[in-house]
Image: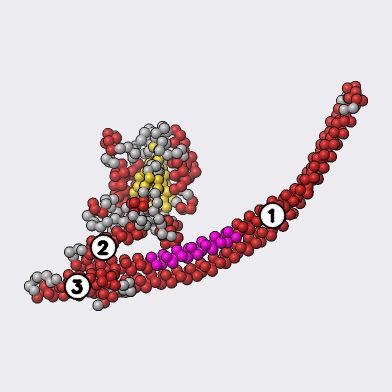
Amino acid sequence: MAIYSCNLKSIGRTTHDAGTAGAHIRYISRPEACPEILSQHMPDEHREARTWLDGRERLSRKNARVIDKLRIALPRELSEAQRQDLVASFMVDLTGARIPWYAAIHQSGKDEMNPHVHIAIHDRDIDTGFRVLRLSDNARDREKAKLPGPKAVDWVRERWEAACNEALEAAGHAVRIDRRTLEAQGVDRKPTIHEGPRAQHIDDHVRRPESRQRINGCGRVIDYPSIDLGRTRREFNAHVIDINLKAAARSPNPAIALWALFEKEQAAADAALEQRLARERRERTGQERNTSLVYRARMARMRAEQNIKLRAAVKKVRRKYGPMREQLRDRQHEERQQLKNRQSRLYMRIAAVLDFTGITKRRQEAARKTLSAKHKTERQKFSARYHKAGEAVTALIKERFASEIAGQKQKRSQHLGQLRERHQQEDNFADIERQQREIERDQTHRLTQAKLEGWTKDRKTNEGKLGGKTSDSFAKALNKTAKQETDRKDHGKDHKPGKDLER
């Protein structure tokens, strides 16, 4: 079902850190999201686009808006190619092909059932450099500039509604989106809130989410516990749906009231089943995580023990080769001193002064270089022996612990594999229970439909007998059904769907 969701935000130089706009480009074009990239008047390659945007940010004034961000839900009724065409045509219509924009469509992988597009707009005319859309301006400034509004977000939401509905109509779909609230549409029901895939996964497989205070991008503290009253988003939506069904059950139209009671009963049965299955899934997730933690702790202890033994082995080698290093250093120092003493004797200094050809100085320099090269070779050989001894000792320790850690990894994989195999069987049983629940729902639906048809037929018959006056048998039967549902809730939980209707 096509839904309406169109959010507009801005990134400015004073309201955000430097490079935030470029970081947003990197985020929306991350490879794991499998994005389809569209752009105009700016590079489509994400690294080049980020560099381009960072350059524009440095050239803009201190309080400038760098980009305007749009996040829009795309209709699942359209194909991937149709969604791309819709985004491209919408942006050309919105910008008049005068300003740069970059769009990343997420519609595959994890977002296959939640297609949406992230759009970054750099509001600067490619020819004049002036702002065109002025989406961050207030109503007075937009009116002064003779721009549609008064609020830019309302204008953008209106344009998206028109573009999306045109695309749906062109594709032959009867469904339409509506930017108005349910109250403005004349729909007498309360709206639910969006439950994202991450929240669904946590609620289904990990734990019941808990509310806590958060700080938004403007630094304002949002007290969610006082807002949601301890309910999760799923529980809040279930509460809203229950309120809507209760309101529908009070409808003057008996058919609407009957189906509302049907949906209320089925929703309660579905919720009871899903709550139990969610508890079981959370237990299974806890088992897998605890198993991983146990093996992870074992391997951490092994690595810690390995590091201790490695340090001890290195210290042992160092203690062994330390005196040898000192002996080598002392011997080389003595040899250098002996050479220096020989070359500094009186007759050697006189010979060097009287030797006008420089042969004596060259011989002395050659002797010093030869001795230095010899010492360097000796140090290199000693260092090689030292490192070889250290590597030989540490290699044995690493080999031993590597085999032990590998054995723990193998045990962990086997243990987790057995757990997942058992959990997969339990998931299969859960699917069977859901299928049985659907069968029960379908049976109850048919019984309700048959009961409704019988009541309608009786009403028409009674109206004919009473000379056109409406019989209240329909309402009495409906009240009886509602009373039976209340009694069932008060006296136990062993009720089977459709039991009252079968009576």
Whether label 2 touches label 3, CB < 8 Å:
no
Tag of residue 81: none
Q: Please tell me which of labels 2 and 3 falls first in the chain.
A: 2
Q: Is residue 503 above or below residue 251?
A: below
Tag of residue 309: 1
Task: Measure the alpha-carbon separation of dots 3 and 1.
Answer: 83 Å
Q: Is residue 22 above or below residue 263?
A: above
Residue count near mark 2 (Cα–Cα under 10 Å), binned few <14, some 14–19, many ≥20: many
What residue sits right under mark 3 in the picture? 477
Segment colored magenta:
275-298
- Magenta residue check for 238: no
Farthest residue in the bottom direction?
A: 503
Q: What amino acid is found at the position of numbered circle 1 in the picture?
A: Lys
Residue 357: where, in percent of width, then height? 88, 24
Q: What amino acid is found at the position of numbered circle 2 in the picture?
A: Leu
Task: Measure the alpha-carbon separation of dots 2 and 1.
Answer: 68 Å
Q: Secondary structure at mark 1?
A: helix
Whether label 2 touches label 1, CB < 8 Å:
no
Q: Secondary structure at mark 3?
A: helix
Q: Please tell me which of labels 3 and 1 falls first in the chain.
A: 1
Q: Please tell me which of labels 2 and 1 falls first in the chain.
A: 2
Q: Nearer the viewer, mark 2 or mark 1?
A: 1
Q: Residue at x 41, y 51 (%)?
A: 105
Q: Is residue 470 above or below residue 307?
A: below
Residue 285: where, in percent of width, then height? 48, 63
- For residue 248, side relative to residue 105 (left or right): left
Q: Secondary structure at mark 2?
A: helix
Q: How many marks?
A: 3
What residue sits right under mark 2 in the picture? 245
- For residue 202, side relative to residue 185 (left or right): right
Q: Evaluate whether residue 49 shows in this view.
A: no
Residue 468: where, in percent of width, then height? 9, 71
